[in-house]
Image (cartoon, rainbow, N blue to C red):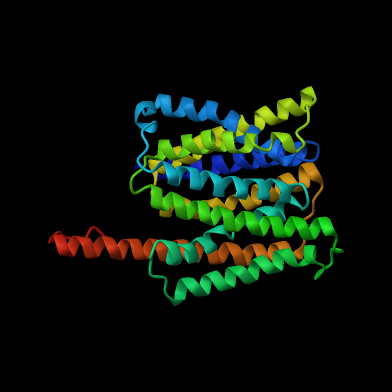
Amino acid sequence: MRPVLGVLLKIASGLVLTGMVMLVKIVGARIPIGEVVFARTFFSLFPILAMIAIRGELGSALRLHRPKLHVARAAVGLVAMASWFGALTMMPLPDATAISYSAPLYSVAFAALFLGETVRAYRWGAVFVGFVGMLVIMSPHLGLGSVTETAEARTGALLCLVAAVGMAGAMTLVRKMTETEKTASIVLFFALVGSVLSLATLPFGWVWPSPYDAFLLVMTGLVGGFGQFLLTQSYRYADASTIAPFDYIQLIWAMMVGWAVFGEVPTLAFYIGGAIVAASGLFVIYREHRLGLDRDRTRQRRAGTPAKY
């Protein structure tokens, strides 16, 4: 393991994926969201296939054990992606990013409901506190703060909430899929199935893009696929519990891009709510890490081997 390299790759992936989000926000103002989602999934296939080929996993990536789960994960992930992309065109980038980071909190509830995991008071408390933080971020867009409520702002905030719940659902399905499926298969078939499913939105108002918009659409997929490659590589060099906290650095990238590119100045609600959501998410990560260590110790004691921690 090379944890420093893993952390650096994680930070770089956040920066690259923020660049992808910037492209979506620019092109999404003129191109239907279904078309943007298709570009994101289809053109991401090229860097994903290159990554899998470099690692010599192309053959094994094509073998599926539970294809229905792949389709379900793609469907849930596409709903989340479409909602997220739609929200980006309706609300400031930092606010949308901060709300999306409530997804790990919902995944705690989904793990209890669908995976049978035991969730105790500490993590339920973190979920509640994080939900309060999300409401703080959303409040100006719902007419409860200094920003005047508009139908677009309200819709954007609600779409972002749907996206966060969808992301949590996708996370839960992926956790289930990793019991039988390879990471390469999960990544590849999301892009493949996502491309097919998003292509079904063609009859609902796709437009012929200008050369500039076509370039942005292609770059959205390529940059997104490259960011996914960096993210995947980061987990090869460091434990998930080491890397996960650095996910929240993407809030800083989003704030900088929102200000520099779109002239979006974060509100006080963003700083307060974002801090609450980040703290809650980090606490959940910490608790799950500790529980993982406890489970390892229990397995080692049962096996009659000394604990490593």
- The answer to whether residue 108 is above or below residue 100 is below
For residue 243, above or below residue 63: below
Q: Nearer the viewer, residue 25 or 68?
A: 68
Q: Residue at x 72, y 51 (%)?
A: 87
Up/down of 146 relative to 164, above or below: below
On screen, residue 166 versus residue 219, left or right, reads: left
Quarter in which the N terminus is drawn: top left
Residue 204, picture quadrant = top right
At which x and y percent is residue 155?
77, 57
Q: Nearer the viewer, residue 199 or 223?
A: 199
Residue 274 in picture, x, y percent from top left:
65, 62
Q: Is residue 298 rendered to the left or right of residue 66?
A: left
Q: Residue at x 47, y 25 (%)?
A: 50
Q: Residue 49: where, in percent of width, then height? A: 48, 27
Extreme-top residue of the structure: 211
Q: Reply above or below: 229 against 303.
A: above
At 23% from the left edge and 57% from the top edge, which residue is drawn?
Answer: 308
Pick the residue in front: 26 or 151: 151
Q: How many marks?
A: 0
